[in-house]
Amino acid sequence: MSKYSSYLVVFLFSLSFFFTSTILKAQLLWEISGNKLAQKSYLFGTVHVGDEQVIDYASNIYPYMDNSLTVAGELDLNIMTSFLAIGYIMSPSDSTLSKLLTKEEYQEIKPYLTKNIGQLAPFLDMVRPIFILAMLQEKEQKKLTESLNNEENTTTKYPALDMYLQNRARKNNQKVIGLETVKEQMAALSSSPISQQARELYDYIIEKNKKPQTVQDSVKVEVNVATIKENDTTLVELKKSESPIHTLISIYLSEDIELLHDQISNEFKKESYESLIVRRNIVMVKRMEEQMNKKLTKENKKSKKNIIFAAVGAGHLGGKKGMVSLLKEAGYTLTPIFFNKKEKEQEIKK
């Protein structure tokens, strides 16, 4: 499986939240002020899963999010967004999967698609291969989650964190927006040549058919456990014996955005990194600035509410071209918000 497709799955279904650096950089929530802003705003790094530990951790941000005029995600996750996305995942008529592969190759992987996709399998020939790959790996993640829930006698009670936060904002009658358009995000996700996507999908399925794998072996994660344990000062203890999904949740809860960025940047080629991360970071920061610098009504000024609370994938925060750095370069003051008692005690001593 290529580095590009490996990252895409991480990006779409949140199987990669790997985090280092100094304690001030290792944070998921940042307060934005200065640069002539009338009122504060916030930037928060999410994970696209609905694990109970993650949802519980996110309750720390409610005082900041609930007191904001606008809540933003990468996309405004609503029904219309889903409908619009459908148009962008379809393959051009001359580049369907059956035409991109040889007849023999297509017939070779067709049984696997039928078995793992089910009723939608007959329509997959019209879908861009990179999104078929994402569907297959989402199935793997779902099976893994269900397996772990059965072991622990628990059930999945929550949607992915991004959706959960937007649902909360809507219940609070807050304005919800996307920092990207569907077209922009879909273009980034399908930026590799469609012929390359088809080859990666074929190779992935062939590899899967080589030998049986247990559900827990189906997701490969490379992390420096010793480094995480040394830097983790938050809510969970990372154990070498944990399943991949538990490990990933533990790493996310360690709040270290810099190691996350380092791991992601090593996963794919430079052009993919530029398309999937850097260009999108620039667009999202620009949209945040537009919101932060809008003229406030007298009522909003009087309310003293935060202008915008932006919740985006944690992989977009770290690095020299991450959203935290870009906002600092634009002249804003970014201050990390600590939730952990140990970190608060250290700050007080300073």
Image (spheres, rainbow, N blue to C red):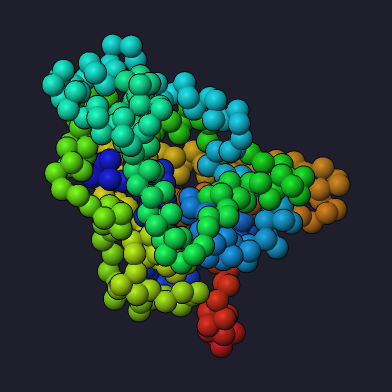
Q: Does residue 22 appear in the picture of this structure?
A: yes
Q: Residue at x 86, y 45 (%)?
A: 298
Q: Find the residue positioned furthest to the bottom.
A: 349
Residue 165 in the image, given as x and y percentages of width and height: 62, 51
Q: Which quadrant holds the N terminus? A: top left
| 116 in relation to 107, above or below | below
**In the rendered image, which quarter is residue 34 located in?**
bottom right
Answer with left or right where residue 323 lies relative to residue 338. left
Q: Nearer the viewer, residue 91 or 346?
A: 91
Q: Residue at x 24, y 30 (%)?
A: 111
**In the rendered image, which quarter is residue 58 located in?**
bottom right
Q: Which quadrant holds the C terminus? A: bottom right
Q: How many marks?
A: 0
Q: Residue at x 47, y 21 (%)?
A: 87
| 148 in relation to 126, above or below | below
Q: Nearer the viewer, residue 201 or 76?
A: 201
Q: Nearer the viewer, residue 261 or 288?
A: 261
Answer with left or right where residue 13 lies relative to residue 101. right
Q: Nearer the viewer, residue 84 or 306?
A: 84
Residue 15 in the image, given as x and y percentages of width and height: 38, 53
